[in-house]
Amino acid sequence: MLELRDIHKQWDGRPLLAGVHLRVAAGETVALLGPSGSGKSTLLKIVAGLETAEKGQVLFGGRDISGLPPERRGFALMFQDFALFPHLDVQDNVAFGLVEQGMRRALARDQARALLERFGLAGHARARVWNLSGGEQQRVALARALITRPVALLLDEPFSALDAGLRQQLREEFRHRIAEAGMCALLVTHDEAEARAMADHAWHLDGGRLAPLW
């Protein structure tokens, strides 16, 4: 379980997060909605370890991980722009995290190709990412996030750049993959339809505090 306890953060002299409490169980997706500038992305970065809370704790499995750097948390973070590496082909984009963890490149590529096959992308393993469609690029980004077997998946407006039909398709796919892997998933979105399609529970963040939506 991922748990946030009493998270506080100021921005430009005003309280951005004012005592945020949140729990996300394994295999569960929780959505965060709220207006622009309400602190949704900041909260996600605090969970990831990219920003530090002024007060409060981030726990996983009952252990306080607030002081751990991002690479030791075992979380995967996905942004709306996919953040794929243009100088690498598809299989090496997916294998990147395993190579960074010290796995031999040949073995990492074998695992990447196996995962690409599950995602229907086996024929694109040696392709350059700029030759893929938006939906294919998003599947590559998801495969890259999942190959390291993260314990939590943090999603920041992951589908906002895609057309409506593709968003619908990928929402279902992501929800299935998250439940299948038994991960905790935290989704930041401004789109309530997206939240309802993907999330088991949703919260509205405004004025530094969370209020339950469902």
Image (spheres, rainbow, N blue to C red):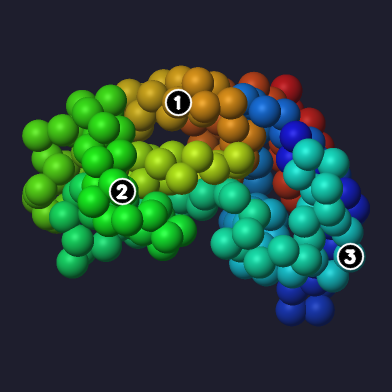
Q: Tell me how far mark 2 sits from mark 3, CA to CA.
A: 39 Å
**Mark with earlier residue (3, 1):** 3
Left/right of residue 86 with respect to residue 101 in the rendered view: left
Badge 2 crowding class, 10 Å Cα cut-off, few under 14, some 14 to 19, many 20 or more, is many
Disc ID at residue 177: 1
Disc ID at residue 8: none
Q: Tell me how far mark 3 sits from mark 1, CA to CA.
A: 33 Å
Residue 122 in view in this figure: yes
Type of amino acid at the residue the image marks with label 1: Arg
Residue 93 in view in this figure: no
Q: Percent position (x, y) of residue 129?
A: 17, 53
Q: Which residue is mark 2?
A: 108
Q: Name the foreground residue: 5 vs 32.
A: 5
Q: Which residue is mark 3?
A: 55
105 over 118 or under it: above or below: below
List the single residue furthest toward the bottom: 13
Which is in the foreground here, disc 1 or disc 2? 2
Q: Name the foreground residue: 41 vs 38.
A: 41
Residue at left offset 67%, top offset 28%: 26
